[in-house]
Amino acid sequence: MGEKILVVDDNRDNVDILRAFLESRGFVVSEAPDGRTALARVEEVRPDLVLLDVMMPGMDGWEVCRTIKNHPELGATKVVMVTAKGGFEDKFEGLRSGADDYVVKPVDFKDLEMKVQRNLRPSERPA
């Protein structure tokens, strides 16, 4: 594998849990504690996938997702929202923001793994 995944969450425990899970499956994980850092890391790391929390100080996940998706070079980057906000309106906002998928906390790791794999499929990646 070796695909690069950026985990964006202001909760250190969440980051550590996701990192351990993803690294055990062969992914290269980088992290960011907030939206502004996440945007810098996306430019630097050029991840294959971003796992993005919504509720963060400063710039929230919706704004980070919109910024990534509107980037002229990085707009095709896959973004999966990982959030406790699981209502219909929240999921709708995720789609409006350009998110490719949505995982509700507490994370069901089978669901997460399926959504990560689905969003990393070569057939769905830009050429």
Image: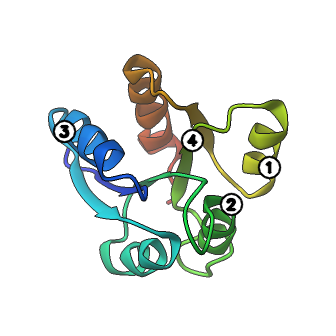
Determine the secondary structure under disc 3. Answer: helix
Side of 81 where 91 appears, left or right: right
Determine the secondary structure under disc 1. Answer: helix
Instruction: Check disc 2 and report the residue beneath it.
Output: 62
Figure quadrant of residue 41: bottom left
Question: From mark 4 to mark 3, how far is it between C-alphas?
Answer: 18 Å
Q: Residue at x 38, y 23 (%)?
A: 109
Question: From mark 2 to mark 4, how far is it between C-alphas?
Answer: 11 Å
Residue 16 location in percent, x, y?
24, 45
Q: Residue at x 39, y 52 (%)?
A: 11
**Disc 4 residue type?**
Thr
Mark identifier at residue 93: 1
Whichever of callouts 1 and 3 sits on the residue coming sooner in the sequence is 3
Mark 1 residue crowding within 10 angstroms, few (<14) / some (14–19) / many (20+): few
**Disc 1 residue type?**
Glu
Residue 61 location in percent, x, y?
61, 60
Question: From mark 2 to mark 1, how far is it between C-alphas?
Answer: 7 Å
Q: Is the Cβ of the residue at disc 2 closer than 8 Å to that at disc 4?
A: no
Residue 1 location in percent, x, y?
21, 42
Instruction: Check disc 4 and report the residue beneath it.
Output: 83
